Amino acid sequence: MSFLTLDLNLLRVFDAVMTEQNLTRAAGHLAMTQPAVSNAIKRLRESLGDDLLIRTAYGVKPTPRAEALWPQVRSALASLEAAVTPGTFDVSKTHATFRMAMADATAAFWLPSLMRSIEREAPGVNIRMVPLTTREPRPMLLRGDIDLAVGFFPGVAAQLMSEPSSPIRHERLYSGIYVAVMRRGHPLAKQDLTLDNYCAANHLLVSFSGRAHGLVDEALAQIQRERRILLTVNQFFTAGRVVANSDLITVLPKHLIASTGMTDALIYKELPFQLPAVHLDMLWHERDARSPAHKWLRGHLEGMNAVAQKTAPGTNPRNDTY
């Protein structure tokens, strides 16, 4: 295959199909027919000598060659778009699909405002939520599985600051604190939460991996204490439901308590030991750094930070009831 004979329009089709993982949806995004998209992918396969995409029951699955090629194609298309349409970006006329990874409570916290903005300002923008099952989303960004990750990624931001050559970019959106959360009628609800009665209680841990050891346990180990984790779950919403209907205690970021949907049944208290602050960071790949649509999305999330600071619960655990 000679690059001089390659139809570059095929790369636009390839990018859309890789984004949607579905030929029909990609056709709709490109304003093409599904047979035309299929034909374009066939021509690209012949040019590159690789299957690129394998049909599955739910759409298409990329080959290793396609996965390796896609980040470069996305970066090149974004650069070309920025070069040929400088200063003409109009979000109301933009058609784009973004894959975002967030935990359930983070999504509940940020998505309502984002959806209102998209409906009002960017009717051609679509969001595809991807499960966040790790505190290390960089491999997903490097592979092009997602366009943006938002969440608590301890250690990642510090590593990125010490690795200026990394293709992953980041920005801090929000900083908050952890609190102990229990049902309103819990035996400890009307008592001071001491280290002894905290450790004597049964606990619920929110763990994406299912590993029954977390930040709290590391902090307790430093002061030669431990707790009994009776249950681990992988969703904040589930944590809220279980704690509201049992005598288990959990630890949550205070700004995410409302996202459990159980605010009327829960209260929170200051922890009887020190934990580091919880940070909400936004991560993306440099291949998308110049994309006007991606910039709009990041700018919206940055703007929501001010709203979050105003609407998050206050700091007095005796007056705030959740």
Image: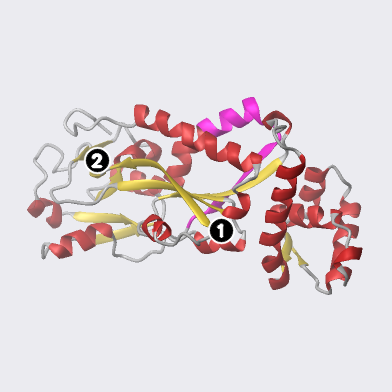
**Between 107 and 86, which is closer to the camera in this rendering?**
86
For this view, does 200 lie left or right of residue 34? left
**Between 213 and 99, which is closer to the camera in this rendering?**
99
Q: In which quarter of the image is the C terminus?
A: top left
Which residue in the structure is indicated by mark 2? 183
Name the residue at 68% across, 66% down.
67
Which residues make up the magenta segment? 113-132
Question: Tag 1 or tag 2, which sits nearer the N-term?
Answer: 1
Which residue in the structure is indicated by mark 1? 141
| Residue 256 marker | none
| Residue 174, image quadrant | top left
Name the residue at 23% across, 30% down.
320
Q: Nearer the viewer, mark 2 or mark 1?
A: 1
Q: Quadrant of the N terminus?
A: bottom right
Q: Is residue 128 one of those drawn in magenta?
A: yes
Mark 2 Cα-neighbour bin, 10 Å: few <14, some 14–19, many ≥20? many
Amino acid tagged 1: Leu
73 up-or-down from 249: above or below? below
Q: Is mark 1 on a helix, strand or loop?
A: helix
CA gap between label 2 and label 1 equals 38 Å
Q: Is mark 2 on a helix, strand or loop?
A: strand
Q: How is the image coloured?
A: secondary structure
